[in-house]
Amino acid sequence: MLMGLDLTPADLARAIGLQQGSISGWFGKGKPTKMISGDNLVATARFLRTSAEYIMTGDGATAIASQPVGLDLGKLSTVLAVVEGAVKDSRKAVPVEFKARMIQRVYESQHALTADSASAVQAALAGLLETLGTD
């Protein structure tokens, strides 16, 4: 378990796109970590819904407030389908954090997704995913 949550180091590794061995030393026996790079620290804090300060020192809030409510669920469902379609078409292994960022950017940039705009977004995302070096 990580930080009292029902999560394993393997869950964290998958979520932020690293091998489990890469994160094995980050969470010691009650001691704050000093062995995590900045980008991995930010990704880990987001995944664990806490602050980077808490991970590094044990001080500060243990949990960050959730995102504000008010999302358009219909639009979010469409955006999710568009992003998942692009990922599937690319046949790439895309880390969850990267997918989440794509979903956020598409959701925030599109006022309304029509069939044509959804196809265009999906094609653009598929093209972007083709440039990734992942399998």
Image (spheres, rainbow, N blue to C red):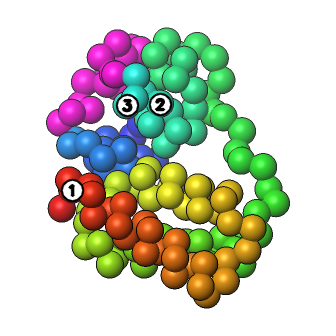
Of the pair 74 and 102, the residue shown nearer to us: 102
Q: Amino acid at mark 2?
A: Val
Left or right side of 23 for 58: right
Would you name the residue on which mark 3 appears?
Answer: 40
Coordinates of residue 104 in the picture (x, y in percent): 59, 56
Q: Going by the picture, which residue comes out furthest to the bottom?
A: 115
Q: Which mark is residue 51?
A: none
122, above or below 55, in the image:
below
96, above or below 114, in the image:
above
Coordinates of residue 67 in the picture (x, y in percent): 71, 47
Q: CA distance from mark 3 to mark 2?
A: 5 Å
Q: Earlier in the sequence, mark 2 or mark 1?
A: 2
Would you name the residue on which mark 1 appears?
Answer: 134
Of the pair 79 and 63, the residue shown nearer to us: 79
The quarter of the image holding the N terminus is top left
Q: CA distance from mark 2 to mark 1?
A: 21 Å
Can residue 4 be seen from the camera position used here? no
Q: Give the residues in magenta.
A: 21-37
The quarter of the image holding the C terminus is bottom left
Give the quadrant of residue 44.
top left
Q: Amino acid at mark 1?
A: Thr
Can residue 47 be seen from the camera position used here? yes
Write the residue at 21% across / 33% down. Answer: 22
Q: CA distance from mark 1 to mark 3?
A: 18 Å
Give the quadrant of residue 66.
top right
Would you name the residue on which mark 2 appears?
Answer: 42
Q: Earlier in the sequence, mark 1 or mark 3?
A: 3
